[in-house]
Image (spheres, rainbow, N blue to C red):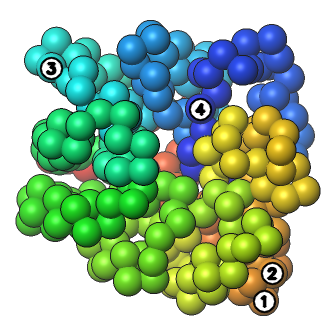
Amino acid sequence: MLIDSHAHLDTPVYDEDRAEVIARARAAGVELMLEIAGSDIGEGSLEKGLRLAEDHSFIYAAVGLHPHEASIYDDALEAELIAASLRPKVIGWGEIGLDYHYDNSPRPAQRRAFRRQLELALDRRLPAIIHTREAEADTLEILRRAWALGGGGEIGGIIHCFTGTAEFAEAAVDMGFLVSFSGVLTFRKAEDLRAIAARLPLDRLLVETDCPYLAPIPHRGRRNEPAFVRATAECMAEVRGVSLEEIALATTTNFRRLFRLQDQPEGAPPNLQPND
């Protein structure tokens, strides 16, 4: 029982064999996948990702504008995202955040889009899926002001593809976030990252592929796919000195708890609270 908590199955690299990729994931024991719909909204990926989730009972979706595209955020796009968030298979808002490594959008535009989307996630009571790269200080400041102070800790979220500092991870956990590790955890030079994965509370951990990117060892250099999440889970089990089964159970339980999918039949919408 494994869950790929972050996948981009809508991307064109899967157009020729998407069904086979999904079948391999299921055969490898991946019971649920979270499709990040809209990872390239400018190219029309939002609807493609949503339909992928709606066509498969074991795939859910998140919607949001990636920081790379923050410069195109406007009222019309916001209305499109809000409408998408109302569809029954949508369980999260993201990935959103800051990326100061590539700066594909100006940093002020990234910060504005990030704050606004956190407000929308709060309004919709959807867990926020956070992308941060070389922007820890600004990410934490915005999360504290625009998320935690608004009650985001009760909703929760994910720090996706975590590769940061122990201090950032601990601060995020204090705000109610889960910390998700990708195939980077398996890389030879990722000793510091493995040390953080070994120390964080087990009930705050997730695994993901971020496919088609960041394939784990022994698949590094290939196109990533959800079946490969097992390699990341195996690495996490090794650094924590526990069995793969324990990591699989913990990360699956953590994902289902965050998105209120406990005891839900496959494909059902989340268990909403009375005031949601």
Q: State the separation of the CA atoms marked 1 and 3.
A: 48 Å
- Tags 4 and 3 in contact by the CB under 8 Å rule? no
Q: Quadrant of the N terminus?
A: bottom right
Numbered disc in front, either 1 or 3 = 3
At 35% from the left and 51% from the top, the residue drawn is 100
Badge 2 or badge 4: first in the primary sequence: 4
Would residue 225 be found to the left or right of residue 4 on screen?
right
Q: Inspect the image, locate mark 4, and give the three-letter code of the amino acid beneath it.
A: His
At 53% from the left and 66% from the top, the residue drawn is 163
At 57% from the left and 89% from the top, the residue drawn is 199
Depicted 60 relative to depicted 274: above or below: above
In this figure, which residue is indicated by the disc labeled 1? 241
Q: Is residue 64 something one can see in this rendering? A: no
Q: State the separation of the CA atoms marked 2 and 1.
A: 5 Å
**Crowding near the residue tagged with mark 2, few <14, some 14–19, many ≥20 C-alpha atoms within 10 Å:** some
- Tags 2 and 1 in contact by the CB under 8 Å rule? yes
Q: SS for tag 2?
A: helix
Badge 2 or badge 3: first in the primary sequence: 3
**Crowding near the residue tagged with mark 3, few <14, some 14–19, many ≥20 C-alpha atoms within 10 Å:** few
**Crowding near the residue tagged with mark 4, few <14, some 14–19, many ≥20 C-alpha atoms within 10 Å:** many
Numbered disc in front, either 4 or 3 = 3
Location of residue 95 by image quarter? top left
Q: State the separation of the CA atoms marked 4 and 3.
A: 23 Å
Q: SS for tag 1?
A: loop
Q: Which mark is residue 8?
A: 4
Q: State the separation of the CA atoms marked 4 and 1.
A: 30 Å
Percent of width and height locating residue 9: 64, 27
Q: Inspect the image, locate mark 2, and give the three-letter code of the amino acid beneath it.
A: Glu
Q: Which mark is residue 238?
A: 2
Depicted 273 relative to depicted 40: above or below: below
Percent of width and height locating residue 272: 31, 44
Numbered disc in front, either 2 or 3 = 3
